[in-house]
Image (cartoon, helix red, strand yellow):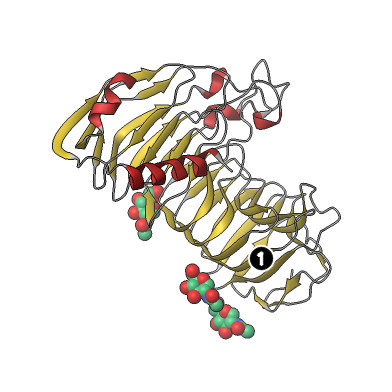
Amino acid sequence: MSPFLRLAALLALAGAVVAAPAASDCTGTIASLDDVDDAVKCTTVVINSFTVPAGETFNLDLADGTTVNMEGDVTFAVKDWDGPLFQVSGKSITFNGNGHTFDGNGPSYWDGQGGNGGVTKPAPMMKIKISGTYSVLNSPERVYSVSNPAALTMTALTIDNSAGDAPNSKSDGQPAGHNTDGFDCSTTNLIIENSMIHNQDDCLAINKGSNIVFQNNTCIGGHGISVGSIDSDVTVSGIVIQNNNVQNNDQALRIKTKASSTDSTVTNITYSGNVGTGLRQFGVLIDQSYPDTLGTPGNGVKLSAVNFVGSTNTLTVNSGAQRVAVNCGSGSCTGTWNWSGLKVSGGTAGKITNFNGITGFTQ
Ligand SMILES: *[C@@H]1O[C@H](CO)[C@@H](O)[C@H](O)[C@H]1NC(C)=O
Ligand SMILES: *[C@@H]1O[C@H](CO)[C@@H](O)[C@H](O)[C@H]1NC(C)=O
Ligand SMILES: *[C@@H]1O[C@H](CO)[C@@H](O)[C@H](O)[C@H]1NC(C)=O
C-alpha cells in the first residue's frame, strides 16, 4: 500500500468513528508547524513565510471548502529521508499561491542519480488533492503526486527545476537533477492545465486511472508527456493530451509499458494539437519493453485506441532522432489507431514492430 493510501484509509476511519468538529468561519495563520493544528479549524488559512524543519512533513488536513492564501514563501530544510515535504487534503479547497513558492532545496540533494542511488531524497515533494494556483521551486526528486478524492483542476502551476539541468560536484558531469517527474498521476477525474514544467524527467506520468486531461501546458527539458510506466493489473483509459508545447525533451509523447507486466489495459488515449520541438530521441515513442528502450517487448499490457485526431500534432525531432517508434508485444496492440492528426519532421523514421493497425499516417 502506498503511504498515501494508508493515510486516506486512516482518515476515513477517523471520520467514521469520531465526527470531525465543524470548521469555524475564522482565519488561522500558519507561521510554523506548531500553528497548523489550530489553523486548520478555520475555513480561511493564511500561510506566512517560514521554514519547515528538516525531516518533517507540512501536513494540511483542511476542512471542506477552506480557502488557503499564501502570503510568503515556504522553504523545506534539508535531510535525507523519504518525505513527502508537503501534503494537503480536503474537498472543495481553493488554494491561492499568490505567486509564492515552495522551495524543496533540491540542489542540496541533487547528485545526478535521483531515486536510483546516492542520498535518500524526499519524494514526492508535494502530495496534492486540491485545486489551486501556486508555484514550486527545485524539488529534490519527484514533484507532485496527485490522488484527488473528487474532480480536481490544477491550473497555472510552475515547476521550475531548471537549476537541475547543470551538473554539480556530485553528478559526474550529468545533469544534477534526476527523477524530477513533474506530475505523477494515479487517479480519476483530473485536469492539469496552463502550467509550466521545467525538469529532468517525465513532464506528466500517468500510472493508472481514467478521465484525465492534460492541456495547454509547457514542458521543457525532460522526458516528455508519458502514459506509464504501466505495471501489472492496472487500467488506464480516457486520457486526453492536447495543446501542449514540448520543448527540448527526449521525446514529446510516450506510452511505456513494462515488459514484465501482466493483466493490464491501456485504452482510449487521444492526442490533439500538441507541438514538440528540439526532440532529442523520438517524436512519438510507444514501447512495451520498458525499462529497456526498444528492447524485447512484453505482451501483458493490452494497448488499444491510441489516436492522433482533431488539431494536428506537429513534432520536429533533432537530426539523429527517430520520428515515430512503436514496439508492441506480439498481439498486444489491437484495433485501428487513427493517426491522421500527426505530422513529424526531422531525423529518421523509426520502426513499427508487431502492429499494422495504424491508419492515416506514414513516415
Ligand atoms: C494557456 O496557458 C497560458 C499560460 O501558460 C495562459 O496564459 C493561456 O491563457 C492559456 N490558454 C488557454 C486557452 O487557456
Ligand atoms: C474516450 O475518452 C474520452 C475522454 O475521457 C471520453 O469522452 C470517451 O467517451 C471515451 N471513449 C470511449 C469509447 O470510451
Ligand atoms: C480520423 O480522425 C479524423 C479527425 O482527426 C477524422 O476526420 C477521420 O474520419 C478519422 N478516420 C477514420 C478512419 O476514422
Who's the residue at 37% across and 18% down the image? 51
In this picture, is 101 found above or below 228? Answer: above
In this picture, is 257 found above or below 221? Answer: below
Mark 1 and ligand 2: say if the CB distance to the nearest ligand atom is below 8 Å. Answer: no
Q: Which amino acid does the dot numbered 1 rest on?
A: Thr
The front one of 289 and 308 is 289
SS under mark 1:
strand
Location of residue 261 (image quadrant): bottom right
Numbered marks: total: 1
In this picture, is 331 found above or below 178? Answer: below
Name the quadrant of the N terminus.
top right
Location of residue 223 (image quadrant): top right
Query: Mark 1 highlights which residue?
Result: 265
Please state the horizontal and vertical placement of residue 167, each as a whole percent of the image: 65, 23
Who's the residue at 61% across and 62% down the image? 235
The front one of 30 and 177 is 30
Who's the residue at 46% across and 17% down the image? 77
Who's the residue at 83% across and 69% down the image? 354
Please state the horizontal and vertical placement of residue 201, each as a whole percent of the image: 62, 40
> In this rendering, would 41 be left or right of 101?
left
In this picture, is 85 found above or below 300? Answer: above
Label 1, residues with CA under 10 Å away: few <14, some 14-19, many ≥20? many
Q: Quadrant of ligand 3?
A: bottom right
